[in-house]
Image: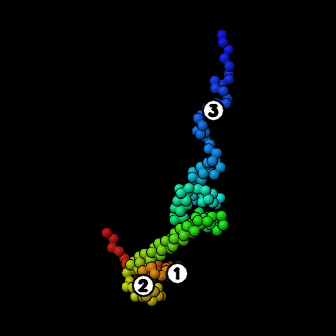
């Protein structure tokens, strides 16, 4: 009977896998790239955003820009403002400031349109003529017109007043 050794068939100096196919690449472990890309930008820490802007690739920058456009006043936007405020970034800081400014301007315009739409709905629901509706809410016809077109926004108190007038004078719709 032959005694077999428990030693491995391959000597320890010879790796089991070909070079470069290891589980962890030293360059990706140092940059934190796998952890960062595995979660949405809105969950990145400020240091991960800074790292992405300093040493990330185009896909990292695009992800940040999409997050800024999606929520220009959110957590990511505040983090980007903080990072851009530091003197560690040069070219990208101007671009990100412009993206943030445009995203906030676009949001403000959309909110202005939404407010005008709401006011138009209240005006229509009241069933009153424009001059009568303006009188009932205590503004001039010109001021109401600017609210209806979205060139001006009323105060919250004025919006509440418009809702009350719309409810009070609202047309009764036939049930059908």
Closer-to-camera residue (114/61): 61
Image coordinates for residue 163, horizontal then vertical, percent: 46, 78
The residue identified by callout 2 is: 145
At x 38%, y 78%, the residue is 124
* Count of picture labels: 3
Q: Earlier in the sequence, mark 3 or mark 2?
A: 3
Q: Quadrant of residue 134?
A: bottom left
The residue identified by callout 1 is: 155
User: Mark 1 Cα within 10 Å, few/some/many (few <14, many 20+)?
Assistant: few
Calculate the distance from the C-alpha at mark 3 to the C-alpha at mark 2: 79 Å
At x 37%, y 76%, the residue is 172
Name the quadrant of the C terminus: bottom left
Closer-to-camera residue (36/150): 36
Calculate the distance from the C-alpha at mark 1 to the C-alpha at mark 2: 15 Å
Q: Is residue 111 visible?
A: no
Q: Earlier in the sequence, mark 1 or mark 2?
A: 2
Q: Is residue 56 visible?
A: yes
Between marks 1 and 3 in the image, the one whose residue lies nearer the viewer: 3
Secondary element at tag 1: loop
The residue identified by callout 3 is: 15
Residue 158 vs 56, above or below: the answer is below
Q: How is the image coloured?
A: rainbow
Between marks 3 and 2 in the image, the one whose residue lies nearer the viewer: 3
Cβ–Cβ under 8 Å for marks 1 and 3: no
Q: Decide if residue 160 is on the left or right side of residue 3.
A: left
Calculate the distance from the C-alpha at mark 1 to the C-alpha at mark 3: 73 Å
Closer-to-camera residue (13/29): 13
Secondary element at tag 3: loop
Image coordinates for residue 101, horizontal then vertical, percent: 54, 71
Residue 113 vs 144, above or below: the answer is above
């Amino acid at each position: 009977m032959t005694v077999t050794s428990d030693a491995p068939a391959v000597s320890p100096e010879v790796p089991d896998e070909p070079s470069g196919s290891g589980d962890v690449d030293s360059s990706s472990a140092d940059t934190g790239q796998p952890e960062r890309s595995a979660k949405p930008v809105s969950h990145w820490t400020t240091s991960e955003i800074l790292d992405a802007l300093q040493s990330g690739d185009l896909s990292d920058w695009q992800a940040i820009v999409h997050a800024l456009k999606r929520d220009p006043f959110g957590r990511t936007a505040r983090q980007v403002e903080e990072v851009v405020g530091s003197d560690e970034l040069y070219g990208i800081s101007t671009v990100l400031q412009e993206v943030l400014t445009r995203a906030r301007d676009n949001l403000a315009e959309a909110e202005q349109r939404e407010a005008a739409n709401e006011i138009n709905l209240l005006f229509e629901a009241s069933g009153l003529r424009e001059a009568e509706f303006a009188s009932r809410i205590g503004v001039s016809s010109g001021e109401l017109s600017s609210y209806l077109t979205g060139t001006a926004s009323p105060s919250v108190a004025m919006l509440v007043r418009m809702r009350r007038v719309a409810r009070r004078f609202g047309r009764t719709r036939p049930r059908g």
